[in-house]
Image: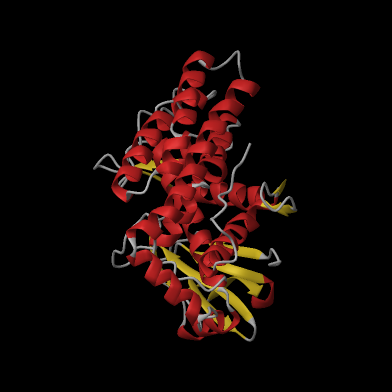
Amino acid sequence: MRKMLNTLFVTSEDVYLALENENVVVLSGEEKKGQFPLVMLEGIVTFSYKGASPALMGACAKRGIGLSFMTHHGRFLARVCGEERGNVLLRKKQYRMSDDEAQSCRIARSMIFGKVYNSRWVLERAIRDHAMRVDAEGLKAASQALAQSLEPILEQTDLELLRGIEGQSSALYFGRINDLILNQKDVFHFEGRNRRPPMDRVNALLSFVYTLLGNDCAAALEAVGLDAYVGFLHRDRPGRISLALDLMEELRSVMADRLVLTMINTKAIRREHFVRQESGAVYLNEEGRKAVLSAWQSRKREELTHPYLKEKMVWGLVPYVQALLLARTLRGDLDAYPPFLWK
């Protein structure tokens, strides 16, 4: 099992990362702001526009430490990868299956089943925990509609039709998200998903956390030898981590959306953590990013029992376990890909 180490998040926009002996050092001009041993790190995510030294990038690649570059708004830019650890036969199988629509649909429908199943149980959990504070009748109706779409998903053999069911299910689910916001209703209001750029605080939070989840999924896929850029539901597009987007579908609601809702409802994130630009776009400021990253790391350390393996693990390992199960499915060790089903 993969050891759960630490991810270093560099939120300052004007620092430079360099290598000093076996440490990553954070520099602001000539001043050293921090120093962290590489041996203690699993990944580095930097939001600084100044970048990192070639020596540090090489050291990270050699040691298998993921080094990801983001804009200060949280948009993914690039990732430094080392020597591929994957089996060439596994990747060739992945490419062949991706080119075959029927095979792609077989994998994709399991992932979408997991997405809809988990979205439904996020609504059900809200009814159970906050029956007197939510529109229980409306949430129950949406939950039942999502449940009714599960069987058609598993029967689907056409990718376009599968995307249609997924789109309808997402609209149902996101249509009830505002009901799950229990506090700070004057600050956080959700009328629907928007991005590039996000136009409200809830969408700014969702986009930021989805980027973190996508980065973790891409790292997990690379760790088990798969190509994060060749997907089954999301088709090939230059620069898009299509398979990571596939993998994160079943994890969005349980790992990302629940974190966003928890931070809003517990007031861990507030109005002052955001900035609105003249264009109307809304983004997290540096303090907001720090708050979300701290909560993200804490959530990844929480324990659960994996529903398929029946083993205890931390949430941060779930993308790696699902990537491993996907690799075993492609090799033929499993008859079908078992999605992550939370309840």
The image quarter in which residue 50 lies: bottom left
Q: Quadrant of the C terminus?
A: top right
Residue nearest the viewer, comparing 228 with 117: 117
Q: Nearer the viewer, residue 4 or 15?
A: 4
Q: Is residue 187 left or right of residue 43?
A: left
Query: Is residue 160 shown left or right of residue 120?
Result: left
- Please state which of residues 119 and 263 is positioned toward the viewer in this rendering: 119
Q: Residue at x 65, y 83 (%)?
A: 22
* Residue 262 makes an appearance in the image: yes
Give the residue at the far right of this rendering: 312
Place of residue 263 in the rendered image (x, y in percent of width and height, measured from the top left): 57, 37
What residue do we see at 63% from left, 86% from top?
A: 21
The way the protein has been coloured in the rendering is secondary structure
Q: Is residue 24 above or below residue 114?
A: below
Q: Name the one closer to the observer, 12 or 173.
A: 173
| Residue at the farthest left position | 279
Specify whether 304 is left or right of 97: right
Q: Quadrant of residue 186?
A: top left
Q: Residue at x 64, y 22 (%)?
A: 128
- In the picture, which quadrant includes the N terminus? bottom right
The relative height of residue 288 versus residue 83 in the rendered view (above or below) is above
Judge whether 87 appears above or below 99 on screen.
Answer: below
The vertical placement of 46 against 21, above or below, is above
Q: Is residue 232 visible?
A: no
* Horizontal and vertical percent position of residue 129: 65, 23
Report x, y in % for residue 14: 43, 65
Report the number of discs: 0
